[in-house]
Image (cartoon, coloured by chain):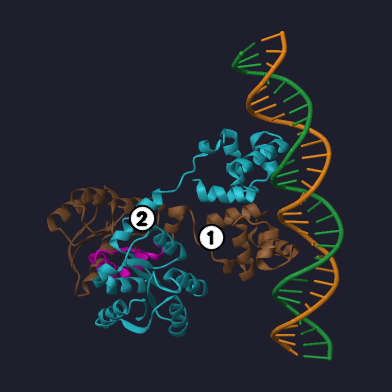
Chain colours: A brown, B cyan, C orange, D green
Amino acid sequence: MNILIVDDDKLVALSLKTILESTDRINVIAMGADGSDAITLFEEHKPDVLLMDIRMDKMTGLEAGEIILKKHPDAKILYLTTFSDDEYIVRALNMGAKGYILKQDFEGIAPALEAVMNGQSVFGEKIIEKLPVLINNKSRFDFSEHDINEKEQEIITLVAEGLSNKEIASELFLSEGTVRNYLSEILEKLELRDRTQLAIFYYTNVK
Amino acid sequence: MNILIVDDDKLVALSLKTILESTDRINVIAMGADGSDAITLFEEHKPDVLLMDIRMDKMTGLEAGEIILKKHPDAKILYLTTFSDDEYIVRALNMGAKGYILKQDFEGIAPALEAVMNGQSVFGEKIIEKLPVLINNKSRFDFSEHDINEKEQEIITLVAEGLSNKEIASELFLSEGTVRNYLSEILEKLELRDRTQLAIFYYTNVK
DNA sequence: TTCTTCGGATGACATTTGTCACTTTCTTTT
DNA sequence: AAAAGAAAGTGACAAATGTCATCCGAAGAA
């Protein structure tokens, strides 16, 4: 498997090369330092996978990627970056990049390359967590971190379905007063004012 | 790396096992045939990665995944499926699955598992192609079709931001009573009961 | 000029909601 | 057995909410 590495940080590029070449299936055929390098080196070597940084002088990895993909729609480009900017993720996805992983977990780059080689796409942990947000503005919320117990979660769900306290009570076989007490507790824990804000919270942060 | 395979098609499950065990780093510790198997076997073996089909009798892989992830948020679940249904992809992403790949390219499953093991997420080619569509497909609600005028829209927006009638009134330089009247009108038009349902409506249909 | 419409406002009313203090009952802990 | 917690409930209260009939003034339409 022939890889082209493009990164303006020589140190990063070199350590990547070292790591990747320690595996026997991967061969680094060339290295570049910016977007225009990426384009010329890609043309010259036709690597199986192009492993490229996003932020670079002269031409960013995204621009270079767009140009390369226009000419070679099957090019496999795997982005490598230090931060996870929403804009970048969307743009990379739209152009048809094969993945977007964070430099920080570079021990995992070799298998990621293997997967890309097999036609799959790979995303780093931090990246994938953002996808639900991008898709429908929903992110996952960890109830346990806010001391929200099982029963409270049920109530939150029902509030988010638009039920009244009375309806929730009969749904859960509790008295209306109890539901009110629970809800009051929930609102305090989440620092919200009323059930509407809770529903909003649910739809913007949970699920 | 210990893997749990769950698929109701014995043949598929067996060939997966064979393929995966031909690599030296992967060890299949157990196999199940439906969602409830997945849950019990997961509890019993605590596999590094759970490789699971989506469509199964009794309990689907998605339901099982949700249950497992509720108890073990760090569980690594990789879905394996024959088709690429939008609904499923979104649901899998929302729950926090580590990937979603098509059975058809099962030669690539081993590296996908490696990548997942390294904390990354892997998606099949056909799957990732759908993501941009999903991201840009935020359904938009056509207010004009429901006779919702300009002012009413403003109020809806503010309700969806969690403001009280009083706050909305001062925001819009109206009296609280007027806001109440408007809101009452809106609720009737949209056939909703209260502001919470309106907020929910907003977050599920608008934007 | 009247008539009508429309945006906005009032006031009154019944409900719903959120808060709080306190009780009961059952289960754990000590 | 006594103490300490949960889980659930009660009653009371203030505030917010939703509904309705009605009113007012300005802008158009007849």
Disc 2 crowd rating (10 Å Cα; few below 14, some 14-19, many 20+) is many
Residue at position x 37%, y 69% from top?
Answer: B79
* Mark 1 burial class by Cα count in 10 Å: few <14, some 14-19, many 20+: some
Closest to the observer: D12 or A63?
A: D12
The one nearer the camera, A110 or C11, is C11
User: Is disc 2 placed on a helix, strand or loop?
Assistant: helix
Question: Which residue, given by chain and number where applicable, does mark 2 sit on?
Answer: B131
Residue B79 numbered mark, or none: none
Residue A1: image quadrant is bottom left
Q: CA distance from mark 1 to mark 2?
A: 20 Å
What range is drawn magenta here? A103-128
Q: Which of the 4 image quadrants contains residue B121? A: bottom left
Asked if residue A33 is positioned above or below residue B34 in the image, the reply reads above
Chain ID for label 1? A
Judging depth in this view, the residue of B125 and A143 nearest the camera is B125
Q: Amino acid at mark 2?
A: Leu
* Residue A164 percent location from the top left of the image: 67, 56
Image x and y of residue A27, in percent: 18, 68
- Quadrant housing residue A119: bottom left
Q: Is A105 colored magenta in this rendering?
A: yes
**SS of the residue under disc 1:** loop
Relative placement, left or right, of A126 versus A54 is right
Q: Residue at x 19, y 73 (%)?
A: A25
Q: Chain of mark 2?
A: B
Q: Main secondary structure of the magenta part?
A: helix
From where the camera sits, is residue A88 visible?
no
Picture disc at residue A206: 1
